Image (cartoon, rainbow, N blue to C red):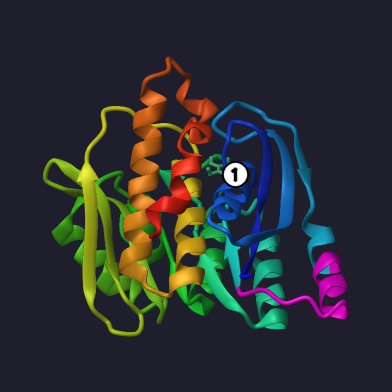
Amino acid sequence: MKRILSVQDISCVGKCSLTVALPVISALGVEAAVLPTAVLSTHTAFPSPAFRDLTEDMAVMADHWQKMGIAFDCIATGYLGSEQQATAVAAIYEKFGSFLFVDPVMGDNGKLYSRITRGFVEKMKDLCRRAQVIVPNVTEACCLAGVEPVGACDEAFAKMLLEKLGNLCAGTVLITGVSFGEQLGVAGRDGKTKEYFSYSREKLPRSFHGTGDIFAAALAACFVLEKDWSHAVKVATDYTWETIRATMEENRDPRMGVCFEKTLSRLPDMIK
Ligand code: PXL
């Protein structure tokens, strides 16, 4: 069985990061090991969450795994709570030398999240330089590329960002949240073939917290199983799209996340 190490926080309420990555990775038949980087009462879209930093424990846990001879097919990172955590992840990656999948969670809609500083962006760039794949949204791609952040962009702008990010990360670069007319999707460049590809679905009128984390978890698990970026992007996009649509049927605070529980059982069939 393939094994992914998911490195991100536990936001106890709000359905994002580890609370969605675990079920999604498991539903695809991939073992989900976890390295919690922090425990928060909620994610940071709620004001003033309680925050327990676990940075000091990260290297200790990784040392124990190494002593036990435990290995991972992929190290997949999500939200990291501090510059030190980005550095700690880089050290863990060097230790295990596995496939590094970086979702550089830093912001959305043209703005950085509340705890993300300019210094953090620089550390995230260091991590992206080592990665075999990075999956920024449009805002994060702008920050990494040194471009004034925007919340949305068209395909031509995404191609310009891909060009710039090719200088940062030699691997596959996948930018999410790109507009293709009435559709929204992913514009990417495969690190091996250097080929451009895109995939999109009809724009939905609502957005919810945590959908990027669901997309990233499905994408990492599909890729670990099949090693095909364009198929993994299709499965992860379709699953995220169907989950948002299912969530729209409920009258929900968008900060409470999506009802992925409604669509999870369909996920294994989507990779066939
Ligand atoms: O969904 C991304 C995310 C994950 N974890 C925490 C966050 C956010 C985005 O705001 O605050 C703690």
Query: x, y (%) of residue 24?
Result: 55, 49
Which residue is drawn at the image coordinates 54% and 26% (left, top)?
256
Q: Nearer the viewer, residue 227 or 138?
A: 227
Within 10 Å of the Cα at label 1, are there few (<14), some (14-19), or many (20+) other Cα atoms? few
Which residue is denoted by mark 1 in the rendering? 115
Tell how many labels. Answer: 1
Q: Is residue 82 visible?
A: yes
**Magenta residue span:** 60-73
Q: Is residue 48 above or below residue 196?
A: above
Q: Does the segment drawn in magenta span residue 265?
A: no
Which residue is drawn at the image coordinates 47% and 77% (left, top)?
132
Query: x, y (%) of residue 26?
Result: 61, 53
Ligand 1 shows up in which quadrant of the image?
top right
Q: Is residue 212 visible?
A: no
Residue at disc 1, secondary structure: loop
Which residue is drawn at the image coordinates 35% and 84% (left, top)?
192
Query: x, y (%) of residue 183?
Result: 18, 44
